[in-house]
Image (cartoon, rainbow, N blue to C red):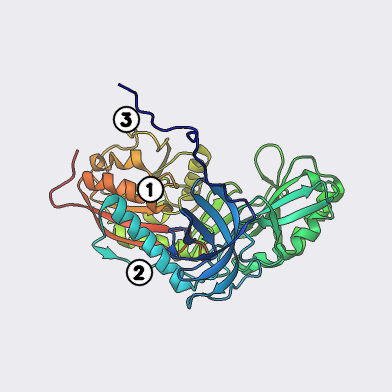
């Protein structure tokens, strides 16, 4: 009997393959709906087009950024028939800068889009809806970002230093003189930064620049060759004029030029100050971060006699406010330097009922010394990969309440499946608008043990 041929690598004789859509091609499209990441979706000749900067119901002229098989990625060049929802983009760089992808969408519609994205993932992947939807946590839609990385690259052909943010769909750098999402104290630094960097003697040796606003302003420069005394003077004078710290990142770890300087941010509701260093993870939106902590504490409802577990604790952003409410907080983080800084933050804030441990939380929890007597409640704030290995064993810790803070609805939904298997139910969920003007979704979910008890 003849063997059936499947998965042919090449077209059979006499067949034809549809030509690939070339990069740069312009195409008129009718947008059918929005994708989960805020891009418009159109269909032409059997291909699915994902179009940055387009809204459902619009007719647009789009330029191809790239194509693979039946999928074409494109950017809106002209809006021929606009949606009633469309607003003029507040930033002059919208559509070219890759930082803010949904500026053309009113803020309330941005929130609705993110809510739909979260609901769709929970429904499709986990087959659940929370018993209660929480109102979105949001703050000002502009002037919120307290940390930013500025791209710097020497163009050898043009003999010019490019300074700005990465372009949408490419590695090009868009010159940015004014960024509306930066907090106001960083705006003058951003505006004057390119001219200052171009005065340095070895621009081809510059890496990137990071800007910080917290208890102090700071400018960090990544450089691949030693700086001359003249260059160092230019940098120091620039930072002094903006009342900002200067940090340098050459070989080794970033260091402040003035060894006595430190960076930090304040949580005024809890009268806490947290120190950090460039490279440490901090939430870029101070207002939403504070509202997020308050909501997490409200949902978790920690009691004075309880022992609470904080997983992926970072610098202690949740652990320290929790420690003010409970008998003991055990906090776990994967990076030892972050564990050390979180422990130091607890001591500097006169909190002595905390214990910090380093552990690889992508691995099973069996045998961890910090589990001890178990926990009444758990808070976890994992990275985009989620916390699958961790949530598989949470029921064994005895926790009746669990607050899960997520920066990826897809992995939250995946982990929800596992939590439900263990006997938890999804009581409440809602979005956190940590990054207005983008389609990035953060969320919070409250799980409680069902009346039937937890599985082993």
Q: Quadrant of residue 135?
A: bottom left
Q: How far from the left and from the top, in percent, is residue 116?
A: 37, 63
Q: Upstream in the sequence, badge 3 or badge 2?
A: 2
| Label total for image | 3
> Which quadrant, please, contains the N terminus?
top left
How far apart are labels 1 and 2 at the CA level?
Answer: 21 Å
Q: Is residue 437 above or below residue 340?
A: below
* Rendered position, 62 above or below 392: below
Residue beneath the point at 73% across and 64% down: 242
Please state the horizontal and vertical placement of residue 356, each as a whole percent of the image.
42, 42
Q: Is residue 104 visible?
A: yes
Q: Nearer the viewer, residue 431 or 6?
A: 6
Q: CA distance from mark 3 to mark 1?
A: 25 Å
User: What residue is disc 1 on?
Assistant: 411
> CA–CA distance between discs 3 and 2?
39 Å
Question: Judging from the image, what secondary structure is the residue with disc 1 in?
Answer: helix
Earlier in the chain: of badge 1 and badge 2, it is: 2
Dot 2 corresponds to which residue? 135
Most extreme residue toward the bottom, as rendered?
84
Is the residue under label 1 in contact with that under label 3 (CB below 8 Å)? no
Q: Secondary structure at mark 2?
A: loop
Tag 3 residue: 367
Residue 28 in percent (x, y) is at 56, 65
Mark 3 or 1: in front is 1
């Amino acid at each position: 009997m003849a063997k059936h041929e499947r998965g042919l690598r090449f077209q059979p004789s006499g067949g034809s393959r549809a030509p690939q859509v070339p990069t740069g091609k312009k195409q008129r499209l009718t947008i059918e709906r929005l994708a989960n990441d805020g891009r418009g979706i159109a269909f032409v000749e059997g291909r699915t087009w994902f179009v940055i900067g387009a809204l459902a119901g619009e007719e647009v002229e789009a330029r191809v950024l790239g194509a693979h098989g039946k999928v074409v990625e494109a950017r809106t060049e002209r809006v021929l028939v606009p949606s009633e929802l469309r607003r003029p983009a507040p930033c002059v760089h919208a559509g070219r800068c890759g930082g803010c992808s949904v500026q053309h969408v009113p803020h309330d519609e941005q929130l609705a889009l993110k809510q739909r994205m979260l609901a769709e993932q929970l429904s499709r992947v986990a087959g659940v809806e929370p018993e209660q939807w929480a109102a979105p946590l949001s703050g000002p839609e502009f002037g919120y970002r307290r940390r930013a990385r500025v791209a710097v690259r020497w163009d050898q052909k043009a003999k010019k230093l490019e300074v700005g943010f990465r372009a949408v769909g490419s590695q090009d750098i868009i010159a940015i003189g004014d960024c509306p999402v930066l907090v106001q104290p960083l705006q003058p630094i951003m505006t004057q930064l390119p001219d200052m960097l171009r005065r340095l003697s070895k621009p081809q040796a510059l890496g990137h620049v990071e800007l910080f606003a917290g208890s102090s302003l700071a400018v960090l420069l990544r450089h691949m060759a030693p700086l001359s005394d003249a260059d160092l003077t230019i940098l120091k004078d620039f930072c002094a004029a903006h009342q900002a710290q200067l940090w340098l990142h050459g070989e080794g770890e970033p260091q402040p030029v003035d060894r006595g300087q430190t960076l930090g941010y304040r949580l005024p509701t809890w009268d806490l100050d947290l120190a950090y260093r460039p490279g440490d993870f901090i939430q870029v939106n101070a207002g939403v971060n504070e509202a997020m902590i308050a909501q997490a504490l409200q949902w978790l409802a920690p009691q004075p006699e309880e022992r609470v577990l904080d997983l992926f604790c970072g610098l202690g952003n949740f652990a320290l406010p929790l420690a003010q409410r409970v008998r003991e907080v055990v906090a776990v983080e994967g990076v030892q330097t972050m564990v050390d800084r979180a422990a130091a933050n607890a001591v500097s804030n006169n909190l002595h009922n905390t214990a910090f441990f380093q552990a690889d939380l992508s691995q099973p929890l069996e045998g961890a010394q910090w589990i001890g007597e178990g926990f009444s409640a758990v808070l976890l704030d994992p990275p985009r990969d989620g916390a699958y290995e961790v949530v598989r064993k949470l029921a064994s810790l005895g926790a009746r309440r669990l607050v899960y803070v997520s920066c990826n609805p897809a992995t939250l939904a995946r982990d929800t499946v596992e939590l439900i298997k263990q006997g938890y139910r999804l009581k409440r969920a809602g979005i956190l608008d940590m990054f207005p003007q983008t389609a990035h979704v953060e969320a919070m979910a409250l799980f409680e043990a069902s009346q039937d008890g937890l599985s082993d």
